């Protein structure tokens, strides 16, 4: 894109100054974007619609679109699926042109539609009375390209002064949006790889080795049965799909009921339900119940494709754990350690010996409402612990 002469005054000079100096305390790009559009209107630019399209690194979404139109105080946010590039809404769209390398897409919406670009987006804008549309790339570091668009309902479209003013904001909007997107990206990556609560602590500065806090929590450890046999005998892609489906079945109920998964370990997972939530133990069992149902559905689906059913074991205990940074001087893991974690791990291993899917310690069972039907199994020796532990099975 060609920036206007730095010495040429434009209608958007005040907006540029605000973007540069007035947004330092604003965290979210969607709020900045909506206010920027309002300020452009106030500066005399006949803006009726604007969108900002950004690519993000997220396990579920390719990107996001922020849309503002006349009269809105906040931008609408829409997530964009990874498969969007195969859909008609993208093919032939301005975004398609831009990501194919175009440096400007400008369309006169007042002229005969047969003479212009063909796409449903242009028809929608004409139907809303818009007269001109323009889109430009926003350049971020290392050649990353995003997209911003502007449209007007002014008869005759934008004039030269309006276009110059809109181009004037692009370099600063690129910088402002990149900072917010990377901040959001850091948060998303931390949530993806360490969980939301641990991610918040790390962003708040909990990054030194050995730092942490003591947390009283219910600990849940789950492990898939016969995974070595499965991984040795099934094609690699099938094994990956199986693990992902299994983790979905287990993880979504845990998150829904307030638990946090701290670690995936091969075919196992470690989750905690902090007792700062009064119903943490009950929530854990509700999550186990829902996970069991999800596994039944998954096994029925796998059976239809000739795959063997998946079995698993869950060990649950409660106690104090150290929650923080552990590792080498250059590579840390944010996790929990302590005897309570070891106990949950030993109970998970005992599920195979006792033929039970879910084993609970007496300490945990004492904290659960009597609404849960628990099977008393008596006392059993647990490897690494000197005294036998009274155990319960949960079949809910």
Image: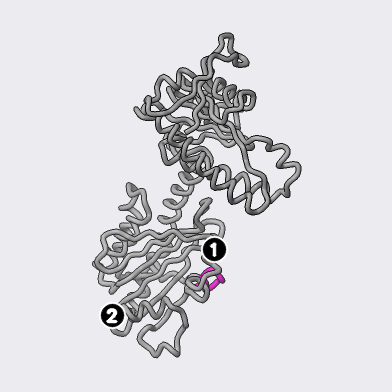
Percent coordinates x, y for residue 251 in the rendering = 51, 41
Q: Secondary structure at mark 2?
A: loop
Q: Nearer the viewer, residue 288 or 345?
A: 288
Q: Characterize the local packing of mark 1: few (<14), some (14-19) or many (20 or more) Cα atoms within 10 angstroms.
A: few
Placement of 93 over or under 219, stated as above or below: below
Q: Which quadrant would residue 332 be assigned to in this image?
A: top right
Percent coordinates x, y for residue 143 in the rendering = 56, 60
Of discs 1 and 2, which sits in the foreground? Answer: 1
Q: Nearer the viewer, residue 393 or 217?
A: 393
Q: Secondary structure at mark 1?
A: helix
Identified at 31% across, 60% down, the residue is: 34
Picture disc at residue 181? none
Q: How is the image coloured?
A: one colour
Percent coordinates x, y for residue 290 in the rendering = 47, 40
Residue 203 visible somewhere in the drawing: no
Residue that mark 1 sits on? 83
Picture disc at residue 154? 2
Question: What range is drawn magenta here?
Answer: 96-103
Q: Mark 1 or mark 2, which has the lower sequence index? A: 1
Percent coordinates x, y for residue 172 in the rendering = 40, 60
In the picture as drawn, the residue positioned furthest to the top comes out as: 386
Q: Which quadrant would residue 256 be assigned to in this image?
A: top left
Q: Is 100 colored magenta in this rendering?
A: yes
Placement of 241 over or under 287, stated as above or below: below
């Amino acid at each position: 894109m060609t920036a206007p002469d730095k010495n040429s005054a434009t209608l958007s000079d005040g907006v540029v100054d605000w973007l540069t100096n007035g947004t330092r305390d604003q965290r979210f790009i969607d709020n900045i974007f909506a206010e920027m559009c309002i300020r452009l209107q106030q500066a005399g630019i006949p803006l009726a619609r604007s969108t900002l399209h950004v690519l993000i690194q997220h396990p579920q979404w390719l990107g996001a679109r922020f849309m503002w139109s006349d009269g809105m105080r906040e931008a609408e946010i829409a997530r964009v699926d990874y498969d969007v590039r195969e859909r008609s809404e993208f093919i032939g769209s301005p975004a398609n042109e831009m990501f194919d390398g175009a440096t400007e897409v400008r369309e006169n919406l007042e002229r005969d539609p047969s003479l212009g670009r063909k796409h449903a987006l242009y028809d929608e804008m004409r139907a809303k009375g818009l007269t001109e549309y323009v889109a430009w790339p926003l350049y971020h570091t290392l050649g990353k390209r995003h997209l911003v668009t502007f449209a007007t309902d002014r008869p005759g479209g934008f004039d030269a002064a309006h276009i110059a003013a809109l181009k004037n904001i692009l370099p600063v909007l690129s910088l402002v949006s990149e900072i917010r997107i990377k901040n959001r990206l850091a948060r998303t990556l931390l949530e993806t790889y360490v969980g939301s609560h641990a991610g918040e602590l790390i962003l708040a500065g909990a990054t030194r080795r050995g730092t942490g806090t003591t947390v009283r929590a219910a600990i849940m450890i789950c492990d898939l049965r016969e995974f070595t046999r499965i991984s040795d005998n099934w094609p690699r892609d099938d094994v990956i799909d199986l693990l992902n489906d299994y983790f979905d079945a287990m993880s979504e109920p845990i998150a829904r009921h307030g638990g946090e998964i701290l670690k995936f370990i091969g075919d196992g997972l470690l989750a905690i339900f902090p007792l700062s939530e009064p119903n943490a133990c009950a929530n854990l069992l509700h999550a186990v119940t829902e996970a069991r149902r999800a596994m039944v559905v998954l096994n029925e689906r796998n059976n239809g494709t000739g795959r063997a059913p998946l079995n698993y074991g869950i060990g649950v205990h409660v106690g104090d754990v150290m929650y923080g940074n552990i590792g080498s001087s250059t590579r840390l893991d944010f996790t929990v350690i302590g005897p309570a974690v070891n106990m949950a791990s030993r109970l998970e291993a005992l599920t195979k010996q006792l033929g039970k899917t879910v084993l609970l310690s007496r300490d945990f069972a004492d904290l659960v409402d009597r609404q849960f039907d628990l099977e008393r199994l008596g006392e059993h020796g647990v490897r690494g612990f000197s005294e036998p532990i009274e155990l319960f099975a949960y079949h809910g």
